[in-house]
Amino acid sequence: MKLTGAQILIKMIKAQGVNTIFGYPGGATIDIHDEILKHDDLRHVLVRHEQGAVHMADAYARVRQTTGVALVTSGPGATNAVTGLASAHCDSIPIVVFTGQVPTGLIGNDAFQEVDIVGITRPCTKHNYLVKDPSKLAEIIQEAFFIAGSGRPGPVLVDLPKDIVQAMIDFQMPGPVKMHTYKPNYKPNKKQMTRAVKLIKAARRPVMFAGGGVILSGASKEFTRIAKLTNIPVTASLMGLGAFPGSDPNWLGMLGMHGTYRANMSIGHSDLIFAAGVRFDDRVTGNLEKFAPDAKVIQIDIDPTSIHKNVEVDCPIVGDCKMALADIAALMEKEARENLMTDRDAWLNRINEWKQLTPLKYEQSFDTIKPQYVVKKLHDITQGKAIVTTEVGQNQMWTAQYYHFEAPNHFITSGGLGVMGFGLPAAIGAKAAAPDKTVVCVAGDGSIQMNSQELMTAVAERLDVKIVILNNRYLGMVRQWQELFYDKVYADTNMEAQPDFVKLADAYGAKGFRCDDPAKVTETLETGLNTPGTVIMEFIVEREESVYPMVPAGGAITDMLLV
Amino acid sequence: METNRYILSILVDNEPGVLSRISGLFSGRGFNIDSLSVAKTADPHVSVVTMVTFCDAHVIEQIKKQLHKLINVITVNDLTQKAYVERELALVKVHAKTDKRAEIMRIVDIFRSRIVDVGSSHFIVEVSGDSGKLNAFVELMKPMGIIEIASTGTIALGRETGK
Ligand SMILES: Cc1ncc(C[n+]2csc(CCOP(=O)(O)OP(=O)(O)O)c2C)c(N)n1
Ligand SMILES: [Mg+2]
């Protein structure tokens, strides 16, 4: 069968079960858009900036637990996609980004809108391809999806020269992917898992620690099962929120720089850390030399490079989190329950004291809205069931602290790269993936301005998202560092010059509400959430509120600034 | 931790861009490259990259794992973990005035190297061996006046029968 390159591309994308492409056209990709138009079962979401397309694909992938797809043109289209790729790379999110490219004959000639996007994105993709041989097109697309979605997931870029897209090519659906150089190992080692159970039985002050890997491998159920069997308290990284129910009495809250006091103290005083799908990022460990000095470490990860990278590991388990946790749970079920939780009460009591001593808290006020209060109310009104995306900064940390996530894939944030401008497009991508869900973006006044053009996408595509702006008229997180470590010199963090967000919503055909009265927060949220369409709810909040507790950069995680 | 010299023999897909994936990994993560050589193998689809690096045991573990993670890398073999043979080849262009010629030829002889080009006032010497031998040779040539050196960087093979 002879097909054009564009036809093959769309056929292969559909074969992956993808129903939505986020994209933006240009000269190099017209043929592909032309082809997409012919497929009623494939939705194209026309964004307003390519960065938005990639963040949308990222969130779509997380919510639908498949691979997300973005399509952008050559040159500037491709370079605009780079931030999105880098963010997905840091957070191990499976996406495939297709970029247009000048015809093969012109590559290397500084042709119009030519960039070496494969060269540019080499360090921020899991892998990338330039298709030069039309007969390899189908196979490369299939490999791209395979690489993106398997092992430790990540973004893959496929660069498509215009002549390849237009070529008539003999097409045969390729067989299953076979790569001699890439064979992710999923199966965890039996001996190591038996050792892990022994270590857990011997531990007196154990803590379980979930990361994004638990969520990516769909292992929350298995993870939670083990926590229940052993009565071990649980913490998580930012990326791991939702892996364990936020309402569980053994939930310690988030770990790290803005973690809870009890989570940090528990890890700091533990004799065993049972970590799954984490990479011990510096935001979690603080000063490595002072990190959990008495703890033995069990670490499960699909990626061997994550093990022994920052923290010495006593019991490494390389493999899929879900498989490993299921196997370990099975081993535990053969044990007498009391052996799995010797002396647990003493440890839990101690943790409870930390909790009583320093819970997460903020001072209520009658005349000014506290940003934490808005997030708390948002949680209550949505019953913790919304999909919540965030921008970056204080808004992100307050969401992590006060929206007690109950289930995986409900908290969508740019964790590793911390991209301002992620939250709004991510909310749109999440809504495309889960049309029946309430999707809320918690934003800062600074971040929302980075990709606010995507309001038009949300409205035009009827992807209704609810945007909560915590407006402190500051680049708040940076201001907080200036307050604490730079003598309160607020250099270039004042955001008083800003648009009228209610009018901005109006200009895009969305609805806008503003609230500056603590007594009206609930009402505003209820109205906003119940108003059909895309809605901005702007809350004028306490300008100089800071995120606490906090570990100053480079400090031990047990040395926290509490207020 | 103490710094050691490691020789890695890395089999990779013979494809454009693979070398920049490897060198990009080293520069991006701040790993050191002392020498690097790329060559064909008996299999036309596979190239071999021989890399020498100085680092501690912790870093070499990361280097090996990170290399392995690259999609185009087939195997990473740390030759310094076992018996191996290493060679480097250098061409050394050295001033050879009439009064020095005999001495240069004597040294060339001792090092079992060869003069491969003779000019009116210079020699080009081909010398091979491990990097220690090459360094010693270069040191001895310095007083004569070295004009130019070209060298291959280290290549190496494990001594065992298999790959
Ligand atoms: C693209 C990008 N540029 C700069 C930063 C650095 N940065 C981190 S948080 C922050 C402030 C964000 O301000 P805002 O969106 O108002 O959130 P707030 O902290 O006030 O809640 C900045 C500038 C970043 N993370 N991303
Ligand atoms: Mg702000």
Image (spheres, helix red, strand yellow):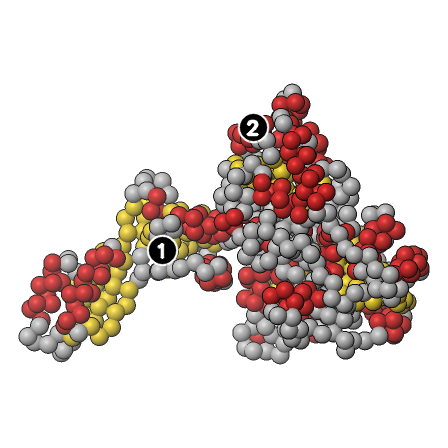
Q: Is residue A431 above or below residue A299?
A: below
Left or right: residue A466 versus residue B61 is: right
**Residue A434 shows in the view:** no
Mark 1 sits on what residue?
A: B54
Measured Cα–Cα span from mark 1 to mark 2: 40 Å
Residue B54's quadrant in the figure?
bottom left
Q: Label 2: chain?
A: A
Seen at 29% across and 43% down, the residue is B83
Seen at 72% across and 41% down, the residue is A251
Seen at 68% across and 68% down, the residue is A479
Left or right: residue A134 versus residue A362 is: left
Dot label at residue B154 = none
Amino acid type, residue under disc 1 in the picture: Phe
Seen at 71% across and 31% down, the residue is A228
Mark 2 sits on what residue?
A: A202
Q: Nearer the viewer, mark 1 or mark 2?
A: 2
Image location of residue A141, percent across then percent down: 64, 55
User: Do the dots labelled 1 and 2 sit on one chain?
Assistant: no
Q: Is residue B12 above or below residue A274?
A: below
Amino acid type, residue under disc 2 in the picture: Ala
The foreground one among A404 and A412 is A404
Image location of residue A428, percent across then percent down: 80, 60
Q: Is the shortest distance between ligand 1 and the CB of mark 1 under 8 Å?
A: no
Q: Are marks 1 and 2 in contact (CB under 8 Å)?
A: no
Q: Quadrant of the C terminus of chain A?
A: bottom right
| Neighbourhood count class around disc 1 (C-alpha, 10 Å): few under 14, some 14–19, many 20 upward | some
Image location of residue A441, percent across then percent down: 79, 59
